[in-house]
Image (spheres, rainbow, N blue to C red):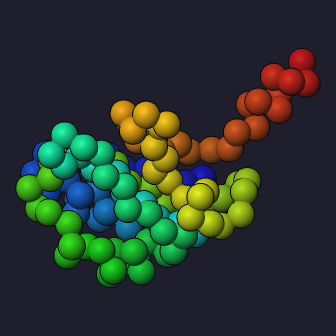
Amino acid sequence: MCGIAGVYGKNAIRLSLLITLGQLDRGTLGTGIAYLQNNRIKIVKEPIHPITFVKKYYHTFDCSINLAISHNRQPSRGKVSYFNTHPFMDCNYQFALIHNGSNTIDRDIANK
């Protein structure tokens, strides 16, 4: 299962990433963060280890951001790739999404 964090408050991006680092046992094959800046959702993600991600991006984020969600991936389905790394953005760029688990529910419903 994946690691998920969300923070609302001062230093949200950095705190969310630190929480994600505390969940390395939950996944190390992809890392990403979504945050709200100037009323726009921004996403940074890569199919890399969370420690590598934090080393690469930690000091580039604006400390004044106060809303962020982050994710570290342990794939149960799908290959390790940028496309499969969370967060995901909806088609209209209105919200970002992270989830924990696989999409096996669709298969289960189809078998009933």
Please report the residue visible at 86 percent of the width from the left and 24 percent of the height from the top: 110
- In this view, the residue in front, 107 or 89, is 89
The picture places residue 42, in percent across and down from the top left corner, at: 31, 52
Q: Is residue 19 above or below residue 66?
A: below
Q: In the picture provided, is 32 more to the left or to the right than 19?
A: right
- Which residue in the rendered view is the most extreme toward the right? 111
* Residue in the image at 11% along x and 62% along y: 63
Name the quadrant of the C terminus: top right
Quadrant of the image occupied by residue 71: bottom left
Residue 1, percent from left and from top = 60, 53
111 or 24: nearer the viewer: 111
Residue at x 29% of width, y 56% of height: 16
Furthest residue in direction top, as rendered: 112
Let me know if residue 25 appears in the view.
no
Most foreground residue, 82 or 12: 82
From what the image shows, is residue 106 above or below residue 76?
A: above
Note whether 27 is above or below 96 in the view shown: below
* Above or below for 105 versus 97: above
Find residue 47 and report its image quarter: bottom right
